[in-house]
Amino acid sequence: MDEFEMAMQRNPHLKAYIDKFRKETNKTPEFMTKLSGDLPKFPNILLPVGDPIFIHLYGTEQEGRVDYFAIEPTLSPAEQEKYGEVKSSILEKAPNEPVPTSETQLREQIAKLLNESVTIGAGGRTSNKKSPLEKLGFSAANRKIPLTQQEYNNIAYYLERDIVGSGPIEPIIRDPYLEDIHSIGVDNIYIIHKKYDMIKTNLGFGDQKALDNWMRSMSERIGRPVSEATPIADGALPDGSRINIIYSEDISIAGSSFTMRKFSEESVSIIQLIGWGGINSEMAAYLWLCLENGMSIFFSGETASGKTTMLNACLAFVQEKSKIYSIEDTPEVLPPHEVWQRLITRESGPVDSRVDTFVLLKAALRSRPNYIIVGEIRGAEGATAFQAMQTGHPVIATFHASAVKKMIQRLTGDPINIPVTFIDNLNVAMILQAVYVKGKFLRRCLSIEEIEGYYEDVGGVVTRAVFMWDPETDIHSFRGLNNSFILEDKIAKIQGYEDTRQIYNDLFLRARILDEMRNRGIEQYDDVYDIIKTFAKHGVDGLPFPI
C-alpha cells in the first residue's frame, strides 16, 4: 500500500474528499510530501502537512488560476453539539488543574481533561435534558459524554486547533510553503505561496462574531489586545510569526482584517538565495568580505522585498566570535552566533515604562558590541546608529527606500536628520525589490552600492554601483571590478595588502567556495555557516571539498 492509500485509510475525511474530487473531475491528485523541482503551472497536487490536514493545489488552464483547498475533518451537526458539551466539561474542570507553563503542557492538559470527559465506544446520542441534580445546580462535569472513535479523533483535533493552535487558519499555518497570509473580512483569506504566488483559500471564519473572537484571542497572545478603542495591533506570535490586526469595521470598510508573515524555523541561506537568482555568488562573496571586515551595511527596499531574509542570510558571514546586539520591534533577526543579545522594544503599558528603539540602541552601545543589528531604522535611532558607526561599531540594518538616492534623502531629512557629511559612515547599501519577470513573482537585488562620501565640489554624496541587475537578462553584473572603493580603500588596507587589487582574488576565491556549495547541494543554513567558520579558521585546507 503506497503513502497516498495509507493516508486515506488513516483519514476518512481525506478519502471522502478524494472520492468526491475523482467523481467530479475524473482526476486523481499527485501525492507529494515535498514540493520541489519544476512544478506545473496548473497543478493537481496533494500535500500532507501533518495528519489530519492536507492541502490540495489545483488549477486548470481553462480557469486560468490555481486554487488552494485545505482538507481537514469537519464536524457534523451532532458532532458540533457533542464538541460544545466536551468543551464545556473541559472548561469546568480546568480551574482545578495547575496552570500550564508551556504549549506542550497545555496540549497534555487538554488531552487529559478530554479523556476524563468522554467514553469511547459505539457512540450514541447523549441526552441534552438535565438530570434532577443538574436542575438543582449540581455540576455536570462528572458526566462522561459517549463518543465513537472517529468522533473522538475529530473533537480532539478541533480542541487542539482552537485552543492551542491558530483556529480556522491552522491548515495554512502548518503549510511550509507559505510566506504571508492576508484576510479581509469573514471569508476572504488569501496566501502568498512560495511556488504559486497569491492564491485564495477555501478557509473562512463563518461569521463576524467568530472572526472578532479570533482576533481578540490572537491580539492577547502578542500582548496587545485590540478593541473598538484600540483597533490596531502589531506584534509577534509565540512561534515568531508576525501579525498585524485591524479590528474595526469603522476603519476597515470590508471588515476586520489581518496580515500574518509566517516565521521560518530556519533562516534561508545565502546559497538558497543564489540558487533562486536573488543575487549571484560574486555579490555574496563581496558581502562576505564586507561583513568579515566590519563594514556597515543597510539592506534597503520596499515592503516584502526580502530585506530581512537577505540580512539573516548574510549574518553567516560575520565572524564567529563576534558579540552581537540586535534591536527590533518584532523579533525577526536570527544570527547564528553564540554571543547574541536580543533586545525588543516595549510599546504597551504606561508611557514611562515604554522602551523604544532609540533607548535600546543607546543601551547596546554601552555594552561594546562588535556588531549592532537594527531591525528597521526609521526615526531618531538612525542618528544614534550613525554615531555608533563613527565610533567603530559596525551597524547592519533594514531600511525602507527603493533606491540609494531616496535612502540618502530619507536619512538626511526629518525625522532622522543625519548630517550629510556623516553619510560615509555607512559603507554599503543593498537595494532589493519584489519584481515580476515573465509572469513570475521574484525577489531580486537591484544593486549593491558603495557610499564613498560627501564632496562639496560636486555638491552631494558620491556613490559607486559595484553590482547591478539587468531586468532584460535577469543577470547581475560586477561593475566594481578593479574599481571598488570599499574593497580597495577599506578592506584591502585592513588586510595589509600592498597591492590593493589582490583583494579581488579573495573575492573570487569566496565566490568559488559558494558555487561549490551550491553545486554539491549544501544549502541548509547551519551547514553553510559551518563551512564559512571552517574557512575562517583553516583556509581552503579546512574545506570539505577541493577548490
Image (spheres, helix red, strand yellow):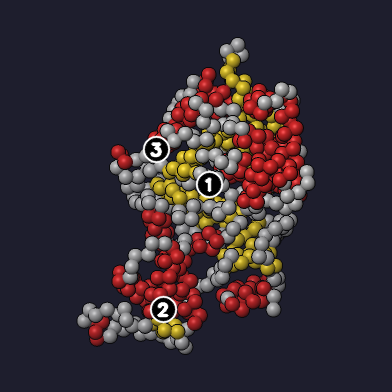
Say which amino acid is labelled 2.
Asn
Residue highlighted by disc 1: 338
Q: What distance separates the C-alpha of mark 2 from that of mark 1?
A: 43 Å
**Residue 405, image x, y percentages:** 59, 26
Q: What distance separates the C-alpha of mark 2 from that of mark 3?
A: 47 Å
Q: Residues within 10 Å of mark 1 (few under 14, many from 20)?
A: few
Quarter of the image where one finds residue 110:
bottom left
Closer-to-camera residue (6/302)? 6
The vertical placement of 278 against 490, above or below, is below
Say which amino acid is labelled 1.
Glu
Considering the image in quadrants, where does the C terminus appear? top right
Helix, strand or loop at disc 1?
A: loop
On the picture, is 424 further left or further right than 368?
Answer: right
Residue highlighted by disc 2: 115
Q: Residue at x 63, y 27 (%)?
A: 494
Q: Earlier along the polypeptide chain: callout 2 or callout 3?
A: 2
| Residue 4 appears in the picture as rendered | yes
Q: Which mark is residue 356?
A: 3
On the picture, is 118 further left or further right than 259?
Answer: left
**Residue 51, image x, y percentages:** 56, 70
Quarter of the image where one finds residue 92:
bottom left
Say which amino acid is labelled 3.
Asp
**Residue 154, image x, y percentages:** 49, 75
| Residue 249 appears in the picture as rendered | no
Q: Which mark is residue 387?
A: none
Q: Residues within 10 Å of mark 3 (few under 14, many from 20)?
A: some
On the picture, is 287 further left or further right than 341?
Answer: right
Q: Residue at x 55, y 45 (%)?
A: 337
**Residue 542, image x, y percentages:** 71, 45
Considering the image in quadrants, where does the N terminus appear? bottom right
